Image (cartoon, helix red, strand yellow):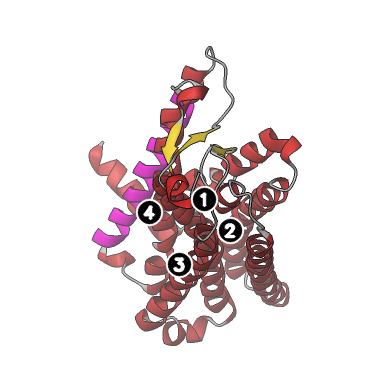
Amino acid sequence: MDNLTFRNSILLMEGLKVTSQSSQPVFILLLLTYVFTMVSNIGLIFLISTEKNLHDPMHFLFCNLPLNDILGATVIMPRMLQDILRDTSERYISYAVCVVQAYFVHVFTAACHYVLMIMAFDRYVAICNPLRYTSIMTNKMVIKLSAFAWGLAIILVAIMIGLTLRLSHCRYKIENPFCDNASLFKLSCENVVINNVYGLVYTIVVLSLSAMCIFITYVKIATVCITSKNKSLNNKAIQTCSTHLAVYLMMYVSGATFILLHRFPEFSDSRKLAGIMFHVPTGLNPLVYGLQTKEIRQKILKHWCRKK
């Protein structure tokens, strides 16, 4: 079958392995998770955009996180919900749709790291250089940092997917609950060394860069807290950084595990679980970051009291 035929072919999505008895409970659980993720993240963006007291660089920078969470949930969850209710032999997806999903899945995962990096930088400036915070974290700087996070993800992922699009295909099964780059180039019977090398190098660079930046940032923040006798500063730093670090570690471990297990087909079920676990912070971010931020928490409580 020629390359053109395969590029317009219909692929079979393996999806999650659930029994007929457990499909409805799993569907309801994932649906509730998706609804909560969308409502909470959209609510945070709406709150920040409508409350003038929250119109500052820190909160504008924070908006990148719920925007990215909405992207990740929308790209993955609706399709996964459909497949759960379908028989495994009827989970078809077109090649073009699969490519689009894979692209945005990787943009979401890459942007997660970059957004958390620029948020860590913001906390570093706020805690370690509070007197210079307003002069450093201007609206212009927020735009530059946000453009860096999204631009880098969009361009590097486009190169990665572009390398996969050049390949012909001799297989039709996506061995995953959603499309990603590795699942796409595994469809080919050609030499995929370039794809593997680029994917691994890109992944290692992203994971190493984000880990190194966040580690250095928190070491400096911890140093300031240890040398400072300001209890208020220390409590604020511990509260902010501990939650930030917990979400980052959960995302980092599950993401690295998902990528590693792609090289071991015998652990496909564990790989699928790791892929889903990567998106758990998406639902937790509004709680972890939104409610842990004093100004946002006060606004939410204020609106709640008005309704009562």
Q: Residues within 10 Å of mark 1 (few under 14, many from 20)?
A: some
Residue 180: x and y in percent read 54, 49
User: Closer to the N terminus: mark 1 or mark 2?
Assistant: 2
CB under 8 Å between discs 1 and 2: yes
Magenta-drawn segment = 27-50
Q: Which mark is residue 244?
A: 2
User: Closer to the N terminus: mark 4 or mark 2?
Assistant: 2
* Amino acid at dot 3: Ile
* Amino acid at dot 1: Val
The answer to whether residue 39 is magenta is yes
Label 1 residue SS: helix
According to the picture, the residue beneath numbered tag 4 turns out to be 298
Q: Which mark is residue 154?
A: 3
Depth check: give the residue in front, 64 or 72: 72
* Alpha carbon separation for disc pair 1 and 2: 8 Å
* Alpha carbon separation for disc pair 3 and 2: 24 Å
Q: Single out the mark in the foreground, 1 or 4.
A: 1
User: Closer to the N terminus: mark 4 or mark 3?
Assistant: 3
